[in-house]
Image (cartoon, coloured by chain):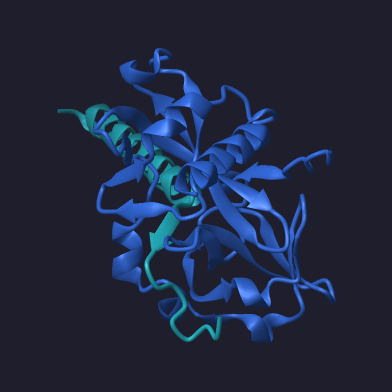
Amino acid sequence: MDWWGWVILALVIIAALVVLAVVVQRKRRRGGVIGLSDPGRSDSR
Amino acid sequence: MTTPTPMLLLRASELAGRPVVTLSGDLVAEIKDVVFDRAGGRIAGFTLRNPGLFSRARKDSLPWLGVHGVGRDAVMVPDETVLTAASELAPRKQARDADVLENRVLTDNGRDLGRVVDVVLHSGASLDVVGYEVEASEALGTAGRHVFIPLPDTVAVSGENLIVPAAATEFVSEDLAGFGAAVGAFRTRLREGAS
C-alpha cells in the first residue's frame, strides 16, 4: 500500500471514531427515567 | 357540578438537558436523568451533568426538596447547597438497572402493550408520573404508533416489565393534549372499582 492508501485508511478510521463518539454522546445526553424503590434514603420525606 | 382542572403534563425527556440555575442566576448544571419513587410515582430528584456537548455526569444530584421551581426553560434552585451526592439519590449501579425507557409494558392479564419511549409527568405541587408513552404493539391496534397509557396512583415497576391494570387499555390516548382527561377518568374508574 502506498502512502495515499495509509492516508485514506487513517481518514476512514478517524471518521468512524467521530461517528461512534457522536452516537454515544447522543445516547448519553438523552437521559433516562429511573424508577427506584427507595430513592434518596437520606431524604427526610 | 365542578369543572375538572386541566392537568399540566410534560414528557420526562423534555427535562433532560434543561439547565439548573440558582436564584442568583448562576448556571450550576444540566438535568441528566429523572429519578422517581416507584412506590409513590413521585419524582424524587434529578441526576446532573456539566453543561456542554461532551460533558461528564456529575457526582452530585438534585433532590426534589431542593427544587424551587420547574420552568419551561430552566429548573430553578435556591443555591448550590441543595445539591447532594448522586449516590444518595440514585446509586450508580441501581440507576443503570432501573431505567424504564425501552422496557415493555404488560397488562396484569398478560397483554404486551408496547415499548416505553417516554414517561409522562404531571406538574403540580410535586412532579408525578401519570403515564407512559409507548410504541404500541399489535395488541393496541395501532402497532408502531406512539400512544399514551395512563397509570394508577401507585406505579408498579419491577424488573424489565412494567405492569399496568388491564383497564388502562380503555383509556389509551393518541395525543398528550387529551391524555390528562384520560388519566383522570382511568383513576376514577379504579377508585370506583375498589370501593
**Which quadrant, please, contains the N terminus of chain B?**
top right
Task: Work out whether B6 lies above or below A44.
Answer: above
Near-viewer residue (B74 or B157): B157
Q: What is the quadrant of residue B107 in the picture?
A: top left
Farthest residue to the left: give it.
A1
Q: Which chain is blue?
A: B
Question: Which of the 4 image quarters holds residue A7?
Answer: top left
Task: From the viewer's perspective, tell me whether residue B179 is left or right of residue A2.
Answer: right
Task: Please report the residue visible at 40 percent of the width from the left and 13 percent of the height from the top.
Answer: B141
Asked whether B137 or B18 is in front, the reply is: B137
Q: Name the spot of residue B70 as percent of width and height, x first.
A: 73, 59
At a point 34% along the width and 21% down the height, the residue shown is B137
Residue B87 visible to an observer of this rendering: yes
Q: Nearer the viewer, residue B165 or B92?
A: B165
Viewer can see residue B119: no
Q: Residue at x 39, y 44 (%)?
A: B101
> Where is residue B124 shown, x and y percent of the image?
72, 57
What percent of the width, then of the height, locates residue B171?
52, 28
Residue B158 lies, in percent from the top left, at 29, 55
Shown in cyan, the chain is: A
Total numbered circles: 0
**Is B23 in front, or is A8?**
B23
Residue at image location 70% in from the left, 29% down from the top:
B177
Q: Residue furthest top?
A: B141
